[in-house]
Image (tube, helix red, strand yellow):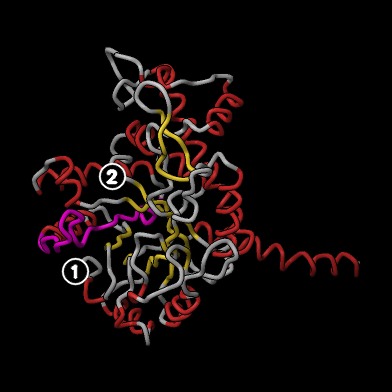
Amino acid sequence: MKRIILLFALLLPTYLYAGSVTLIEKTRPLLNGVQVFVLDPVYEKDPGRFFDEVKKQGGNTVFFRVFQNSSDRHHFLKDSECETGVYFRTEEACVADDLLAVMTEEAHKRGIRLYAWMATRTLSFLKTPLLMEKTFADGQGTGEGYGASIFMSAVRRKLVRLFEDLAAYDIDGILFQDDFIMRHREGASLSALHAYYMDTGVMLTSGDLFGCLERENRTKVSGGCNETYIPWAYWKAQKMADFFGELRQAVLVRNPSVRFAANIYYETPVDAMKGISWYSQSVDMLLDAGFDYLAVMSYHDQMAREMKLDYDGTKEYVNGMLESLVVNVDDKERILMKLQRVSWADKSGVDRGELEGICRLIDSYGSISKAIVPVNKASEIFGGCFR
């Protein structure tokens, strides 16, 4: 009897811990977030002030950039020996500054959630000639891809180790940069071709994928061959989702409470085949793989420019996104609508009235999470979106 009691006492904490992890995974609170590109120098001596100001504006979450690409400005606009690297301790990259430790501590003192915003395929230190994915060029041959190849073991190992080191911090979550995709012609490297052949028995050429003049082209890409391109596109999307699962597992082993958010392009919720073809991303696949939030890049100014829509047409498109998302996502809080504060075209501020109108549209659907992009100073939060 004593042995049974002792065994129960030993197993009970493990059971409770497992239960708490399950509870944490199922609890996905409503986020009112800001995404920090380059934290303003005014906060260098007192980062806590930034979180105080965000909280006063109604924010409860900060998505903080923890990677440094060669084209990025450094946080606080400081000089650094690292042209490219990260803002957390690791042996896998140059450490520009161990800023994540301070930011996490200051956020939690004030009850603010801190998500590490992390890149993958386009990390500058990964984009070497040997590690790059290839694209199918028009006609014969290949070209350089968008980012590093997930089909190369060296790339996968590097990213897994980086995410393990990131998980050593008391972060609340990780926002995957919008580079966690594959472009429509990517997948021409020998590693990718071999992987597809091993899975399907099919060896692909550019002509097999892009050499058709279909009467009914369902691929959403020029010259796409329905019978070969569509299975390949779905395969790539699944490979991206599978690799996320690998990164997710590496993180949860070290930090079981971390939640994950995926940047979603604005076409993906409205046109599933476009998402699969253009970005190798699918709402269903990403949810099945374990993403907690879908961070939809619902940038109304960008959409208006790219699709040549007026404001009413843009709102109608955003409404279509929301209609699709609330049907396909079980908890509305998991839908994170990202709102554009400045125009990507000329860096000017967007019209406040337009931003407020988009916020009201989102709020009409109930408890849907929101994030304003970019916010480098708390004074840049406007539009009443968190009120």
Is residue 103 magenta-colored?
no
Quick one: SS at disc 2?
Answer: loop
Q: Which residues are magenta?
A: 331-353
Q: Is residue 232 above or below residue 265?
A: above
Q: Examine the image and state in which quarter residue 136 appears.
A: top left
**Whether residue 334 is visible:** yes
The three-letter code of the residue at mark 2 reads Tyr
Horizontal and vertical percent position of residue 291: 47, 50
Label 2 vs label 1: CA separation?
Answer: 23 Å
262 sits left or right of 43 in the view: right
Residue linked to disc 2: 266
Q: Residue at x 51, y 49 (%)?
A: 290
Residue at 54 percent of width and 19 percent of height: 202
Q: Residue at x 28, y 45 (%)?
A: 266
Total residue callouts: 2
Density class for disc 1 (Cα within 10 Å; few <14, some 14-19, many ≥20) is few
* Residue 348, x across and y down, in percent: 14, 62
Work out whether residue 37 or residue 144 is closer to the camera in this orientation and state it.
144
Q: Which type of secondary structure does the marked residue at label 1 adopt?
A: loop
- Between disc 2 and disc 1, the foreground one is 2
Q: Is residue 291 left or right of residue 351?
A: right
Name, please, the residue furthest toward the bottom.
45
Give coordinates of residue 130: x percent, y percent: 53, 43
Q: Which residue is mark 1?
A: 384
- Residue 220 x, y percent position in the rendering: 30, 27
Q: Nearer the viewer, residue 315 or 381?
A: 381
Point out the image quarter for the N terminus: bottom right
The residue nearer to you, when weighing 331 against 300, is 300
Q: Give the quarter of the figure containing the C terminus.
A: bottom left
